[in-house]
Image (cartoon, rainbow, N blue to C red):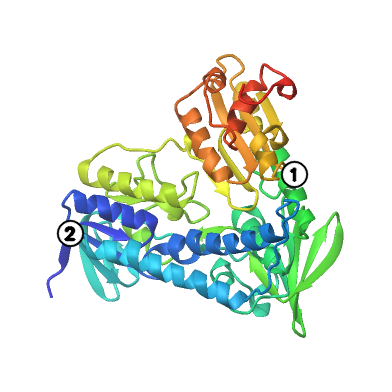
Amino acid sequence: MSMQVFDLIIVGGGAGAFAAAIKANELGAKTLMVNKGLPLGGTCVNVGCVPSKTLLWAGEVMHLAKNHSIPGVNIEVKDFDFSQVVQHELDLVAKLRTEKYEKVLNGLENIAHIEGKAAFVSPNEIEVDGQKFQAKKFIIAAGSTATVPPIDGIKKVGYLTHIEALQIKKQPKELIVVGAGPLGLEFAQMYSRFGTKVTILQRSDSIFPPAERELTDKLTEILTNEGIIIRTGVQVQSARREGDKKILTYIVDDKQEEVSADEILLATGKTPNTERLALDKADVEVDEKQAIKVSPGFQSSQANIFAVGDVTNLLIRQEPTAGREGTLAAENALKNAQNSIDYHSVPWTIFTDPQLAGVGLTEEQEIKQIGSCLCRTVSFADVPKAHIIGRTEGLIKMIIHPETKVILGVHILSPNAGDLVAQAMWLVKNKNTVDDVVSSLPMFPTLSEALKIVALSFTKDISKLSCCV
């Protein structure tokens, strides 16, 4: 059998891989997509954004019914069927996987697809289940898998990753979440609102160290008030089973403590899927975390091999960035372009309720770069819309350059913070000044007014201002 030769081979089937395939198809490149592991669509549609946010919304609806703060309105949640809610989530996943991935792939006339494990034979050749394929260029978009931390006995005791936690039909009465961050916090609140007793064990002293401490401390307070037990500064040592319970032993404040639950969810990060790719045979370098080292143009140490998404050592790992990286990497590979991404202006969001979001520099980062920080933090109690919907618990923080007044960062804890940070993204990306925001005219009453109010706080006492100033 003669070996098949392609212009481009894409290893993976998630957001980055599909974006690369769509662009390659537009450019008329003969392309092969090789996928193995998660079904087409990768993490986002199968075991990430779509299913987790579906369950988060279900939990939010239940919570809102009981905690809407509107006098004279009494709403009762009569029934809650955990297995039915999970099945609804799984049905939606199947629908979107078919509509947004399988049908899309079938419509790409220049793209061939096979299921199988790819391993490099040389810089220009891979082997898939005994069959070899050659290409001029490659894009590796193989994603990542949940990291299992070195906890003594954890594999014997058993655990959940985000994959199993989105698919189990029996709701645990008690759940231990090892690790905070986006995954741990979202799943903790989701299960807590469903009625599970949740304990978070977090290694650092913050539930999300990259974010502004004022905001994460406030979110910790909110989650604690909802009944979630949060222990920070924890070193988990071992796991064991006693009867039907799984028990974790940990050290906190130099004391040994234990916590038991029906299930343990590991949320301690993800490991790039590079182990089985035989990258050494292609002379592709990886770092100490097994992530592929790439240039700003997504090029690996091997000139004809590019990589995008979770499999790389890039600064931000998100579905939107993976997709954009895939598009740009395909152009770079096939057209010898020099595309890159300004990650400084890429926002992020943790979809708790309230949501935690940010873009640009934090106060700590500005001090390191400039030597000082010109920052303001405003409570959503100063935002009229927050009073209307009974959600005044949030905070917004703006960081600007001390001399030019250019907005360098915006960080938000509020309902729909993921939507609000999209506006802040443009302020950072376009290097707008705080005066630009002060002179803007946002719609009243909206939560987006928070951006103008925090901008006004640099020069005015906002407690002495009327609405719509």
Look at mark 1 in the image and give the residue it sits on.
Answer: 217
Front position in the image: 288 or 404: 404
Q: What number of labels is visible?
A: 2
Q: Marks 1/2: CA distance?
A: 51 Å
* Kind of residue at badge 1: Asp
Quarter of the rendering containing residue 55? bottom right
Q: In this view, does 378 lie above or below 370?
A: below
- Compared to residue 389, the image places residue 57 above or below, namely below
Drawn side of residue 34 relative to residue 182, left or right: left
Q: Residues within 10 Å of mark 1 (few under 14, many from 20)?
A: few
Q: Residue at x 34, y 45 (%)?
A: 299
In x, y percent, where is residue 371? 65, 21
Is 22 left or right of 291, judged from the image as shown?
Answer: left
In which image quadrant can residue 15 be found?
bottom left
Indicate which disc, 1 or 2, sits on the residue closer to the N terminus: 2
Residue 272 horizontal/vertical position (percent): 47, 58
| Residue sitting farthest toward the right | 255
Q: Mark 2 highlights which residue?
A: 110
Tell me which residue sits at (42%, 52%) in the image. Answer: 309
Residue 325 position within the rendered picture, expressed as x and y whole percent measured from the top left: 37, 46
Q: Is mark 1 on a helix, strand or loop?
A: helix
Of the pair 288 and 297, the residue shown nearer to us = 297
Position of the N terminus, as image quadrant, is bottom left
Callout 2, which amino acid?
Answer: Asn
Element carrying mark 2: loop
- Is residue 267 among what the camera can see? no
Whole-percent x, y for residue 403 in the image: 59, 14
Q: Residue at x 53, y 29 (%)?
A: 442
Farthest residue, direction top: 403
Give the farthest residue toward the front.
72
Viewer-nearest residue: 236 or 424: 424
